[in-house]
Image: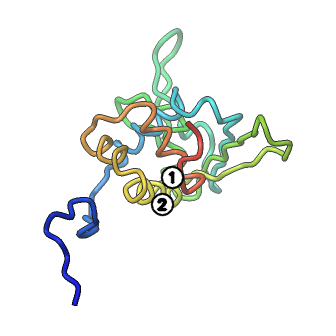
Amino acid sequence: MTTATLNDSKSTFATISIPTEVSEGRVRDLLCGAFEGGSGYWISSVTKHYAEGVVAEDFKVESDIGGPYTPAGRFTLEGDYWPSVMLIPFVQGCYLTLTVEDEVDSDPPKTYKLDRDTMKRGLEIMAANEPKHFADFLDENDDAHTADVFLQTCLFGEAIYG
């Protein structure tokens, strides 16, 4: 008969999953951090794809600067300025493709799809495999590095850069 020692503080006692609600606004914050700094070193290009009946003007920002007033597009959030790349993946049927060129590898560039489903999957992967970054995100202590890890988990299923 074997007995466990009470002093074994390094072994895993339990792994606990706790359901966590995450708002679209917080995910937009992560995309902002990724697109405006965190992931710029590995993304070659971003292409916008619209669902049937959706056009680029649906994401334009309200403005009265430098000319006549132009109303916001139907998917633009009132009172906020969010570039379209931070809104498009949330709209059903719309998505972005991100192109990645490996500087070392001679393979052709690869493209990855970013939409609602891949963002949800990325959050789950980040929670499971990158708990420090996920905790920073939940504590609103995220930064460009956290945002970069999020985008990588969305597209690649793991953090492979940086």
Residue 131: x and y in percent read 35, 51
User: On the rendered image, what quadrant is the N terminus found in?
Assistant: bottom left
**Tag 1 residue:** 91
Toward the viewer: 76 or 70? 76
User: On the rendered image, what quadrant is the C terminus found in?
Assistant: top right
Furthest-top residue in this view: 66
In the displayed structure image, the side of residue 59 where residue 29 appears, left or right: left
Residue at left 35%, top 35%?
Answer: 142
Residue kind at label 1, given as amino acid type: Val
Residue at left 17%, top 71%?
Answer: 5
Determine whether the residue tagged by mark 2 lies in a helix, strand or loop: helix
* Mark 1, other Cα within 10 Å: few <14 / some 14–19 / many ≥20: some
* Mark 2, other Cα within 10 Å: few <14 / some 14–19 / many ≥20: some
Residue 61: x and y in percent read 49, 28
Image: 139 above or below 126: above
Question: In the rendered image, which quarter is residue 105 located in?
Answer: top right
**Tag 2 residue:** 121
Toward the viewer: 114 or 40? 40
Residue kind at label 2, given as amino acid type: Arg
In the displayed structure image, the side of residue 15 where residue 6 appears, left or right: left
Residue at left 21%, top 60%?
Answer: 9
